[in-house]
Image: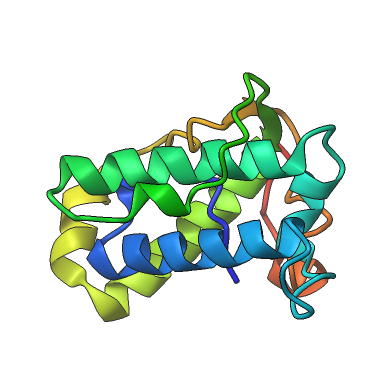
Amino acid sequence: MRLWSLHPKFLDRSGLVALWREGLLAQAVLEGKTKGYVHHPQLHRFRVQANPVGLLAEYLRAIHAEAASRGYRFEATKIAPSPTDSRIAVTRGQLEFEWRHLLSKLEARDPKWLARIIHVRTPEPHPLFYTVPGPIEEWEKGYGCTRRPGDTDA
């Protein structure tokens, strides 16, 4: 499961569809409707909030909006009716990590899409998130394995 902190506009078609599906799975987990994935690290940042289901619903709404802007037909009725005005902090290090990860995936999966976004120097976060200084988030799977010499904590 990958719940990108990056703005969904950076995802190619396959990435956006996968994010929608994984977001719906995450919503089901947070609602207690599944036995699997309950301890998945990607859910940590939602679980520690006062309204995790509402935040996940807002996360999905932004994905739905991006999909609609591209002419895709994601079923909005699958989003939980739990609105919230809250946002979640994400570290600059996490965004940079995810950006490198996405570029690597696109290099193999969709080089044409990669060419459209490769010029971006400071990728925007998903609308649910606001950026703060800091390293890769501790909940990131394989955190200890993903840092390389020269990685910054900014």
Q: Nearer the viewer, residue 120 or 21?
A: 21
Q: Nearer the viewer, residue 55 or 94?
A: 55
Most distant residue in the top direction: 85
Callout count: 0
Q: Nearer the viewer, residue 32 or 48?
A: 32
Return the x and y of residue 82 as percentages of the image width and height. Answer: 62, 35
Left or right: where 55 falls relative to 20:
right
- Residue 43 in view (yes/no): yes
- Residue 7 in view (yes/no): no
Left or right: where 52 falls relative to 98:
right
Determine which quarter of the picture holds residue 56. top right
Which image quarter holds the N terminus?
Answer: bottom right
Return the x and y of residue 64 as percentages of the image width and height. Answer: 35, 45
Which image quarter holds the C terminus?
Answer: top right
Give the residue at x 69% y 69%: 146
Image color mode: rainbow
Return the x and y of residue 138 as percentages of the image width and height. Answer: 84, 55
Return the x and y of residue 80 as percentages of the image width and height. Answer: 57, 45
Q: Nearer the viewer, residue 54 or 19?
A: 54
Left or right: where 44 falls relative to 121:
right
Give the residue at x 15% y 47%: 70
Give the residue at x 29% y 56%: 74
Determine which quarter of the picture holds residue 105. bottom left
